Image (cartoon, rainbow, N blue to C red):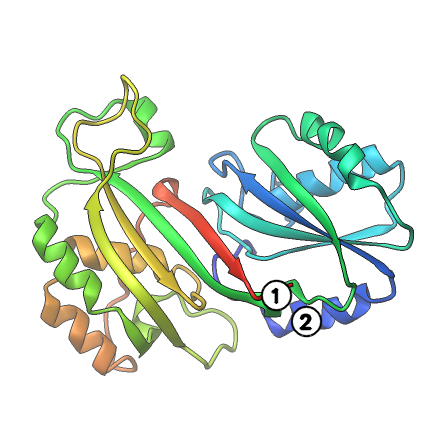
Amino acid sequence: MAYQGDCSLGANRDFKALLTRPYSYLFSISYFGARFKGWAKQQGQPTIEGKLERVFRFVLGHEDFRLLGSSRTDSGVSCRAGFLQVFLKEKVDFEALLSALNLNLGGEIRLNCVQEISREFNLIQSVRQKTYRYFFSDSEVFHPFASSYFTSVHQINSLEKMNENASLFEGKHDFKAFCKVSGNKTDFEREVLSAKVYESELFPSEFSPEKRYCFEVTGTGFLYHQVRKMVHAVWYFSPNQIEERLENPYASWDPIPTASANGLVLWETVLEEI
């Protein structure tokens, strides 16, 4: 299942298996997620991880490698700045292969740079914080081409009220009422370092809506669908509705609708010093 949120204990078990390969490389990665069913491999579905594996297999000429991503983004979510760790049994000059890798990735995925790192470096545990940006517009005139980057919404809160709502998420909270609960997960506490809404000038084009907004949130980690449910609450909830759910996360609340994926971008991933 594609997952926008924290990686599981299973990922750490997988990491131990990766240590049988003595060489490790860290790539900076960007991708446009609209035509992918998320990061994680799914049989018969186009995914970021699946395409990366096929391209690495083709360029390297073998399949004796393993990949590990810093974020398992959900279906349709894009990434401006993430990381990919590759483990191999032999040393490879990836600087020389970077052009071939990007050529075969076809433009929707790009490996920006690469460096060799210690195989003991654990990418999952080294992520210090992430910033997501969600782009949207309430303009009456909204061209279909703009849906590549923006979500069209109507009758949302004013910019002032959206910022008031966003600020309520800052700090450490139990976000059980603001995520999709999956599996046997019991830990729903996360820390939001900052959250705000502002008018954006990004993605200007003849097809872009006149008014463009961005919800930007930075945190140490996020739960499944947490950001997109926070976005819906920012749009339509009153401050009291947000505060009640943060103060009483285990009450019998109706599920919060999940904002669509096409406006969401993993904007920045910050790692501990390597």
Task: Check disc 2 and report the residue beneath it.
Answer: 12
Name which quarter of the figure residue 232 lies in.
bottom left
- Comparing 188 with 201, the one in front is 201
Which dot marks residue 124?
1
Name the residue at the front extreme.
273
Name which quarter of the figure residue 131 lies in.
bottom left
Name the residue at the right extreme.
90
Is 269 on the left or on the right of 114, as rendered?
A: left
Q: Residues within 10 Å of mark 2 (few under 14, many from 20)?
A: some
- Comparing 69 with 49, the one in front is 69
Query: Cβ–Cβ below 8 Å for labels 1 and 2?
Result: yes
Point out residue 246 in the picture as x, y percentages from the top left corner: 24, 77
Point out residue 199 in the picture as x, y percentages from the top left corner: 19, 41
Residue in the image at 50% along x and 59% along y: 270
Type of the residue with mark 2: Asn
Position of residue 270 relative to residue 80, above or below, is below
| Residue 9 seen in render | yes
